Amino acid sequence: MDYVGIIIPFIGGLGMFIYGMQIMAQGLENAAGSKMKSLLEALTRNKFMGVLLGALITAVIQSSSATTVMVVGFVNAGIVDLSQAMGVIMGANVGTTVTGWLVSSVEWAKFLSPGNLAPIAIMIGVIVMLTGKRRYTKDISSIIIGFGLLFVGITTMSSSVEPLQDSQAFRDMFVTLGRNPFMGILVGAFVTAVIQSSSASVGILQSLAAAGLVPFNAAVYIIMGQNIGTCVTAIMSSIGAKKNAKTAAIMHLLFNIIGTVIFSILAIILFTGVFPEVGRGMISQTQISVVHTFFNIGTTVLLFPMSDWIIKLAKKLQKDDDNVADESRVLLDERILETPSIALQSTVSEVSRMGKIVIRTMERAKDVMFTMEQEAFDKIREEEDTVDKLCSSITEYAIKLSSLTINEKEHQQVASLLQIISDIERVSDYCENISEFAETLKNHRAEFSDKGKGELAEMSQVCADCFRYAVECFEENDKEKALRVIEKESQADQLEIRLRSEHMKRLAGHQCNTDAGIVFLDALVALERISDHARNIAEEVLSLN
């Protein structure tokens, strides 16, 4: 038998199948665009919503491995907690059955015959791609072309293995896998771990089934093994991540192992005692889809009430402790860049966190001019250093995000984010400057007059409110708060002019200390510039609205 003539076309068909699946998923993801943000918000409601979201995202990106890797990234970035992640993981197992149904549709929907449908789909997709000018149209063409290539790939694989029908050794191998559940599970897990996609692994099994080579019992055990093999990708992605991210990967493995054990016992009872003839019969592509769907939905329904117990067990198995929380450690994960729209939302969350740190620094700076406490000086310097590190890391991540395939609106959002990051960092710098001015005042043993203290406190409060509103309007995408920032910034400008004029009169009348007077003017300038940067943030928010 010409095994080279079988293997080479099979590998080529598998490559085309995976590539078609990938570009179809990319087109679906791009078409979904900003809707992924609302999906993420839905996730935060409850675990059941997480199951639905996990199923939907996996159906779109055609890979439960990719979804669980994304979830590990979410947990590592602090976007979701373990309970929410558990829901998505369970839903991912359900969503991954969609590809199998697409492949088996050639049996239960004859009009979808690959020989007829695939060339037509590819031709239509190419025409749409060449004639369409809008980005959305090109995304639709990717979906159509990917759909066609997926069918061409599965047809090539099925055709290439047809000669194996005459190979008794190949048939005996599958009979052995059916008789030995452990071996069947091991083969399914190994193949899926190697190609890093349970959907592609099921596609391979269906191509062999189309040639009449796979017994029912062997297929069932292989399918169960495929669910374990798909965990390898998430476990690998959790290497070097935080404790919770590693726990999420272990949760995924536990969920699939427990489901496999339960259903393997049921399958062994069924195929050895109740319906042994069913186990020995050949399985079809559609029956593989049914078994795959029944197993994954059954496991989800059965283990959903036990999900909290699985989380607790995963935590016990994950013994590594995280280091003390480091605010300067950016909670952005490279894995999430696989889904740019959600990576963008993750970046927004980190910029918001950076802004809240600076709000805290601003409150310290506002008081330190009067308290002059060394502890406050040190804390402001520490927080400014934290913000510098966050600024550098978030900017680097945002630049990577901007180089990905995102739509025009998302490009504008990234550009605005880069500007806002810069504005927040500059506010942090001015807070440190104010702290340094206060330290200078302390070293010279000088202090403001009572009148000067009152004026500086008034200016500080206006500018602190202005910046706080700016961060809030950015975080909430609130147009009304953005307008309030602009109003406060105008108030700060007028106040700065008035206070500067009155202070110059006091200096001329020798009513205050010269050293304190210089610090007063420097602090006034720094505070006014803080309000300017707050206005910049508000204007970016308004421009996006």
Image: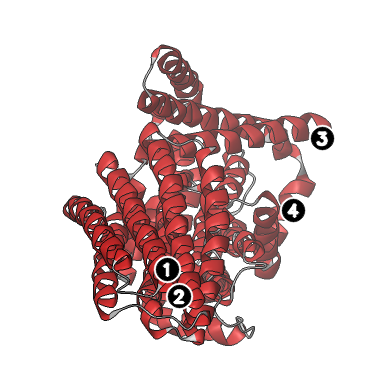
Q: How is the image coloured?
A: secondary structure
In what element is the residue under mark 2? helix
Question: Counting residues from the N terminus, which is met first, the one under dot 3 or under dot 4?
Answer: 3
Do the residues under discs 2 and 3 have CB atoms within 8 angstroms? no
Tag 1's secondary structure? Answer: helix
Looking at the image, is mark 3 or mark 1 earlier in the sequence? Answer: 3
Is tag 2's residue or tag 3's residue first in the polypeptide sequence?
A: 3
Name the residue that disc number 3 marks. Answer: 3
Q: Quadrant of the C terminus?
A: top left
Residue at mark 1 = 519
Count neighbours of disc 3 (C-alpha within 10 A) and say few if under 14, some if 14 to 19, many if 20 or more.
Answer: few
Q: Which mark is residue 374?
A: none
- Rendered image quadrant of residue 464: bottom left
Look at the numbered discs 2 and 1 and tell me whether their residues touch, using CB distance below 8 Å: yes
| SS at badge 4 | helix
At 42% from the left and 52% from the top, the residue drawn is 423
Amino acid under disc 1: Val
Where 244 sits versus 133, above or below?
Answer: below
45 or 61: which is nearer to us? 45
Please state the horizontal and vertical placement of residue 354, each as a whole percent of the image: 44, 64
Whole-angstrom CA distance, mark 2 to mark 1, is 7 Å
What's under tag 2, amino acid-wise? Ala
The picture places residue 142, in percent across and down from the top left corner, at 46, 28
Amino acid marked by disc 3:
Tyr
Q: Is residue 375 left or right of residue 236?
A: left
Number of on-image labels: 4
| Tag in front: 3 or 4 | 3
Within 10 Å of disc 1 (Cα), the crowding (few <14, some 14-19, many 20+) is: many
Q: CA distance from mark 2 to mark 3?
A: 82 Å
Contact? badges 3 and 1 (CB < 8 Å): no
Residue 438's label in the rendered image is 2
Q: Which mark is residue 172?
A: 4
